[in-house]
Amino acid sequence: MPASALSSSAHAPHRRWRIAVLLGIGVLVNFFDRVNISVAHDALRQAWGISALTFGVLSSSYNWTYGALQIPIGVMLDRWGVRRVGRIATLIWSLASFASGLAPGLRSFFAARLLLGVGEAPTFPANAKAIGYWFPDRERSFATSINDAAAKFASAIGVPILGLLLIGFGWRWSFIFTGFISFLYFLLFWRVYRNPSEDPRLSPAERRLMAEGNAQPESAPAAHIHGAPLLYLLRQPQVIGATIGFASYNYVFYLVLTWLPSYLSMSLHVNLLHSALDTSIPWMVATVTDLLIGGWMVDALVSRSLLRRNGRPWLVRQSVLVGGLAFGAALYGASFAHTAAHALIWISIAMAGLGAMAPVGWSIPSLIAPRESVGRVGGIMNFATQLAAISAPIVTGYFAGRGNFRASFLIAAIVLAVGIAGYVLGLGKLRVIPEPA
């Protein structure tokens, strides 16, 4: 990146950050929808008499459609763009949230969760594509961290808020509440989001900063450029390594997202209100490390590395990816805890590491993808991460039904070790994938 671009960034307008905040709000709302079911575990069990394993299946049902659509959604995003796909998607997930709260029985609730997965499927591939368009390379980690920290912050504040709604008004109103705020976000996204080429208020200075900083160029009309073929991308070591590494992160993320309140109540006998409040602690820690380490610190170190003649910005990112997954294995320590306080210390250490590496992991598609292929690379990555997200609640539910959370946490640590190998051996130095012949 030219030094002139680095020095001019402080003087350029900051319209691009409006987009980062908008996308972050979307993720916040998105994860209110996702975490809602973990808070409602006891209420759903009482209403429909479901077992721990059935709850695990129900928790993962959202990820079935979400995961199945990742690769098609990547193609749609590269073909039709973030704005068009995003508007349709936000409307669908709003309707699905309302449908969950109004579901008369288990089957209709299950169907509503499947529909929620359809609506929220474009979220992270679309955000990766939008951030690639709007942000220079040196700002991409922090811009991504705003989105990813919103996922952690949603769990930190969402679990207590939804828990209080559930206690005061019943589980149905907690889902209706998320439907209402989802619809408000649909209206906001419709009004605000534009690509850089469509935004009349984007100044020439900021547009120049983005271009000089290697922001992803917008394509010619979709009829002429379709990006790299899926089979070509699937054969690339960078894509394979990034996918394995981030799938391991997502396995642990969804284990904690769907089972932490239940783990505290089932293993450590914490009541519903206190488990909801205690659950917010690891997520708040993850929010802080997400922004400060995965976002601000990584961008600062990458900028410094870019100014050096022999700088290695890839090493900064790779170190955070590997170190974050290594810290995530601290989750296993919680299985030896006899009090909620001790368990929360171990889980907070794990989530601190995962929070720090997550923004870097999400920024990988925009760093390695060929031209107009960010959506496809993001779709491939997110498809595998959703397989992990489907597995985690079910595997945990199987062992939780037998009162054995220790086995679940041990499996999570092994999964993280596989992820570290994927990043080191496959992703390597984060080189851009060559254009196909």
Image (cartoon, helix red, strand yellow):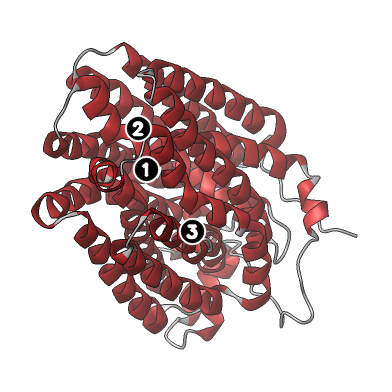
Any part of residue 409 in sight: yes
User: Which residue type does callout 2 highlight?
Assistant: Ala
Q: Residues within 10 Å of mark 2 (few under 14, many from 20)?
A: many
2 and 3 marks in contact (CB < 8 Å): no
- Residue 67 percent coordinates (x, y): 58, 52
Q: Residue furthest left?
A: 168
Location of the N terminus by quadrant is bottom right
Who's the residue at 71% across and 34% down the image?
A: 426
**Which of 206 and 38 lies nearest the eye of the viewer?**
38
Which quarter of the picture shows residue 350?
A: top left
Query: Which of the marked residues, 2 or 1, is nearer the chain's N terminus?
Result: 1
Distance between mark 1 and mark 3 Cα atoms: 29 Å
Question: Mark 2 sits on what residue?
Answer: 352
Element class at badge 3? helix
User: Which residue type does callout 1 highlight?
Assistant: Asp
Element class at badge 1? helix
Which quarter of the picture shows residue 431?
A: top right
User: Which residue type does callout 3 highlight?
Assistant: Leu
Distance between mark 2 and mark 1 Cα atoms: 8 Å
Any part of residue 310 in sight: no
In this view, 304 is above or below 323: below
Q: Is residue 214 left or right of residue 56?
A: right
Element class at badge 2? helix
Question: Mark 3 sits on what residue?
Answer: 114
In this view, 214 is above or below 345: below
- Residue 380 percent coordinates (x, y): 66, 51
Labelled disc at residue 290:
1
Q: Is residue 42 left or right of residue 321?
A: left
Query: Which of the marked residues, 1 or 3, is nearer the chain's N terminus?
Result: 3
- Residue 107 percent coordinates (x, y): 43, 56
Query: Between tags 1 and 3, which lies in front?
Result: 3
